[in-house]
Amino acid sequence: MSCALLLLLMSWALAMRTGAAVEIQRPRGVPLSSEQFYEENKPFTCLDGFSTISFDRVNDDYCDCRDGSDEPGTAACPNGSFHCTNAGFRPAFIPSSRINDGICDCCDTTDEYNSGATCQNTCREMGRKERESLQIMAEITKEGFMLKQQLIHEAKRGQEDKQGKLTELQGSKKDLEEKVEALRTVKETAEDPEKEAKERHLKAWGEQKELIRMEKDKTRMAEAFLELDDDADGYVSVAELQSHLELDPDSDGSLTETETQVRCLPSQENNFYHTSKLQGCSPFGEIRRFESKIGDLHDSCRSNEKVWAGGLWMTTGCMNLEKEIGFDFGPSAEFAYLYSQCYELSTSEYIYRLCPFNRVSQKPKFGGSETNLGLWGQWAGPEDSLYSVMKYDHGQGCWQGPNRSTTVKLTCGKETVVTSTSEPSRCEYLMEFTTPAVCQEPASLDEVLQGHTEL
Amino acid sequence: MANFIERMCLYLVLVLSVFLSIIQAVDRSNFKTCDQSAFCSRQRAMKPGQSSYRALLETLELSDSHLTVQLLNNNNKVLLLLELYRLQGNMTRVKINELKPVKPRYEVPDVLITDPPTELMSVVAQDEHRVVLSLGGEDWRLILSAQPFRLDIMEGPQVLLSLNSRGLLAFEQLRIRKDTKSQTDTKEAGEKEDTEKHDKEKVSEGEEAEEEVDQPGMWEETFKTHADTKPNGPSSISLDFSLPGVEHVYGIPEHADGLRLKNTDGGDPYRLYNLDVFQYELFNPMALYGAVPVLLSHNTHRTMGLFWLNAAETWVDVSSGQGSSEVPQTDVRWISESGIIDVFIMLGPRPNDVFTQYASLTGTQAFPPLSSLAYHQCRWNYNDQEDVSAVDQGFDEHDIPYDFIWLDIEHTDGKRYFTWDNNKFPQPKDMLQGLLDKRRKMVTIVDPHIKVDSSYKIHTEIRSRGYYIKNKDGGDYEGWCWPGNAGYPDFTNPEMRKWWASMFAYGQYEGSMENLYTWNDMNEPSVFNGPEVTMHKDALHGPWEHRDVHNLYGFYVQMATAEGQIQRSGGLERPFVLTRAFFAGSQRYGAVWTGDNAAEWGHLKMSIPMCLSLGLVGISFCGADVGGFFKTPSAELLVRWYQAGAYQPFFRAHAHLDTPRREPWLFGPDNTALIREAVRQRYTLLPYWYLQFYHAQRTGQPVMRPLWVEYPEDIATFSIDDEFLIGRDLLVHPVTDERSSGVTAYLPGNGEVWYDVHTFQRHDGAQNLSIPVTMSSIPVFQRGGSIICRKNRVRRSSSCMENDPYTLYVALDSQGNAEGELYIDDGHTFKHETDKQFIHRRLSFTANSLSSSDLSPDSQFPSASWVEQVNILGAQKPDAVTLTTTDGGESSVEFAFDPDTAVLTLRKPGMNAGVNWTLHLR
């Protein structure tokens, strides 16, 4: 059936009902559904059954019933409510304190019958607008729901893939672990002589260091002399000394690179201009030999590490997969497609970034670092729609305040978009996010319209 | 490495946050103790003893209005001039100034509403030692003793009060700086001669004046990194008062302390110096945001008041103990940094006499718009127009009434007051119109620090007109506050105030409308980088130093703002301005609140004595931030605070920027319902609150009262500050303890009866009543003998209730009588004053008849309100009830009697609230 036809039918139904409503005589503020309790000229029993009063006390601007049911059309009862028919729009109950308070609450103006407020009947206009938006919503829901089915399908396939991959990875991981174990044994065996050699090397090196120090002192003296003997006459004059006020009398004994060069000079001339580490010019062949041995060992370690890294990578891979499979992606995994995606929204000051099941962040548009507004916490919707709200918490701390956190409200939409962000309280963010994954199976348009035009 | 740095940072943050949570309370080192304040320390070092002052009776002159006599300081030979006035209404004024100061000393202007009218003073007896003056009546005397100088006020043989009886009168005369003196000597010989002549006068007695030695801190003083250059040198004053027979003294707000003032021996004196104190501590004599230098003394016979009219930094020592012959006595000593001694002694004798006397000096509480007595919703900050609209909507959705929504500093364009943030509030008028459509209102903050920014009109105008306060060197004073670098307009300048007021015109304050009102914060003034977070004392207000006028600054800011609001409506509409800083007389310009409190049970409790103390010194329109400003209240604390706040004069919820949202519906449906109920109770009682403020404006009686004010002879009431009275007729004992299962309320009055307003249960007076409580309990009692009018049809704002009918609660006393009043006007204009447009009626129940009679026959106001119900508490069942109206009509009225509660309910008598009528019970 075409929409136009539906609308036509609906407006006809409306017109009929409006006509009917005019004819029904019932006390002001009483909904059609309660009409039978208010029988003219018969004693009225309060709806809570607590007391019975004569009918002329219904709507006489004095509260007789505890439950406020005798004054549906006046503001006399503190707990009363007033029914606006709102023909052309949605009927509504308002607290009776809003009757004749000078503010137009019912679009049919019936709440302001004695306040002097001038209200316009806006029901038809509002009804039209609402129907339009319902229509749009219905379309979105319909398309969204179709997309959702697709998402569910993809998620199911994706999940199977991942499960397979995980099993495979878990298998290779086991192999690798065995390999690692074998290599570790090899390594440990090889390392024993290395340790021994190292100890010997260190002892020898201690003796060598002593020699070096003595040598160094001599060299330094000569050097200092040359430097101080400005006129190169072989004598250091007082004047020459005075011109070197920067001279530091303390020798701190530490081996700088320059000092090393000086020490290496006699044995490795070609190294003179080459800055090298102490170890690089060790004069002891034995040490060199051991060094090369150590190098070999290191190489074997490295390959060992590669295996380790492979294992690690695989472990991480396993963990990631396990983690991903472990996520609650909704009853039919319809939210799985959001995993490892990010969605951005730009405001006047910031760029907000939502990476579902991971984190929310904020980055100033004009420079400055990113702020973590919360890490994935859990689904946090009310009981009947748990999957309508996501909670991200433990974000960056606030000065004197809580850690930043973000609540993401999900609404049905054809596209996956962050539509708004706000910070209702300091460091507590609110984000609105549309996704087909929350679209509910659309009720037939009939039902939708039915629900909203009852009189 | 990056990882390491990150971890270190995290660690640092952790350590810091622990550190911060430890130092949540006030950083005391930011504020001076008496020892750190040179003049206080100097003055306090002086111990009681023989006064060095002598009254030179030969110089005594008596005119019709006052007496003058010179006082000589025997040590330095400086002469003072004492002026004594007998003021109308049983008051005495004592003024002491230097006879010939080297330059004028500051005398506080604008606080007194008139030059107080005097009465004839006559000499009763005189000899060389003393003069006895009559203060009227049969046996009221003032005795002036010459050597040592002292004053005693006597009633018959009884000393009511003595001045300088402990010899603590001290007056640091202004002097010429020694290092500049020699220059003056050489350069200006003529002047030198004058000075010498002047000096000679001082030693006219022929004795040599003792050479006065400069003490440290006399010519300059440094606190932390702030230097006070003190170009005028020492100038402090001090005087002691003794109150024989007095054990209870009150007042001198603002302090976060109990109602009854404590002994300050061994601790710091109470300090009066308006300061922006971050996270103030409870039970502490430290200065806070406002200062009213008025102290009340009370015993079973007499209530008296001392008003020390001085706006400089002031310290007050209170010492209670045994006087001579084992009579209790309280000694009070005032110390101020500059200015003169100008004291008003209010002799009572009853509490309401002291209120009347003080009101005759500084005026009464401004009669506020009715809506400002309703509920206010505030938060730092409502973020934008959508936020305002959502909160407004939230109140309607949860059916909780409110009248005002507030915007804190973030609503402005970069803390430039009188502007709006264009992104967040692009259409302020649309927003205000939206509120107006719901008969609601808004308040925006306008602080006195002005951003130094050449593109900001307010700044450029003030600068070009030369209205900024100057620094000691004559340039515009600048300090740091919310906007960064800011100037401070000189509100002591009447021209400046006039200009400021004109900025509130609808055409000047863009986006403003008639339902927009104002909040003046930070007007101590707060200067973030100044000494003690305020202004340098050597800053200049024209010829005067900031030192002289400091405590007046906030008073003037509110004065100018309120004037602006009146002017924008052509003088028609009453203003509403909230201020944080205040002084004596601030009651004339609006409401005050107790500043930046915290969400703690102790702060909830403290809100009672803080507002009671303010009420005693004229400032009735007082409230504390409901929920607590800093920190986050538990749902229980928040509910209890709403319940207490609903029964305090200024009822506003407020919260710090860093705290989570706490609109009333965010704590689950049960708590929402509890808060709704508390707010609704406030709205039903608005006619009663409005009547109390009408009285406050007319008489100066406080709205929120300590029990002793109404029961001055009942010693049991003298120290009570966990319960209070609203007017005379409602006694409130809020629940201020966590997980409380009961409170004990003292019901005063021998032979009186009190009715629980919720259950109508009747209790005898003069007893401690244990009251079991649940989360919904707000223990409130109506005094037997009173009639209270309520409007029980609570709507979404007070304006919506304008034409609603009244329900009368007639609480019979033990003789079966009751009395009350009803006041009605338009709720927002001055027409009650200018055109006598109001209804003021007396309601009286006696001899089984309840009648309404006109208390103001020459006034008129058309009211649509009528009487829908009368509840008579403590009644007996009548046979019939008839209504007689002035037009002679008589009709029968239906009624119901509940024998369990003894409440007689008259159904819909229906008469208009503004006419005469009588209901007869037969």
Image (cartoon, coloured by chain):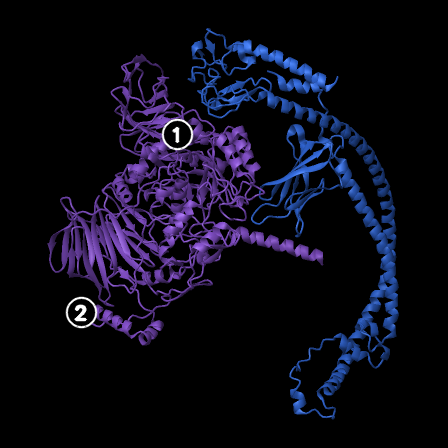
Q: Quadrant of the C terminus of chain B?
A: top left
The residue sitting at 36% across, 45% down in the picture is: B586
Image coords of residue B493 (percent x, y): 37, 53
Residue at the spot of label 1: B685
Farthest residue, direction top: A41
Q: Amino acid at mark 2?
A: Glu
The part of the image, by quadrant, that contains residue A321 is: top right
Q: Which mark is residue B205?
A: 2
Any idea which chain is the blue one in this picture? A
SS for callout 1 = loop
Please give the chain letter of the residue carrying mark 1: B
The number of callouts visible is 2
Q: Quadrant of the N terminus of chain B?
A: bottom right
Colour of chain B in the image: purple
The residue sitting at 22% across, 53% down in the picture is: B162
Residue B697 located left or right of residue A442: left
Image coords of residue A296 (percent x, y): 88, 63
Question: Which one is earlier in the sequence, the residue at label 1 or at label 2?
Answer: 2
* Depth order, front residue of B347/B45: B347
The part of the image, by quadrant, that contains residue B226 is: bottom left
Q: Is residue B329 visible?
A: no
Q: Is residue A230 visible?
A: yes
Report if the CB atoms under discs 1 and 2 are less than 8 Å apart.
Answer: no
Q: Residues under labels 1 and 2: Cα distance?
A: 68 Å
* Depth order, front residue of A302/A338: A338
* Depth order, front residue of B772/B466: B466
Q: Amino acid at mark 1?
A: Leu
Image coords of residue B837 (percent x, y): 33, 30
Q: Which mark is residue B28?
A: none
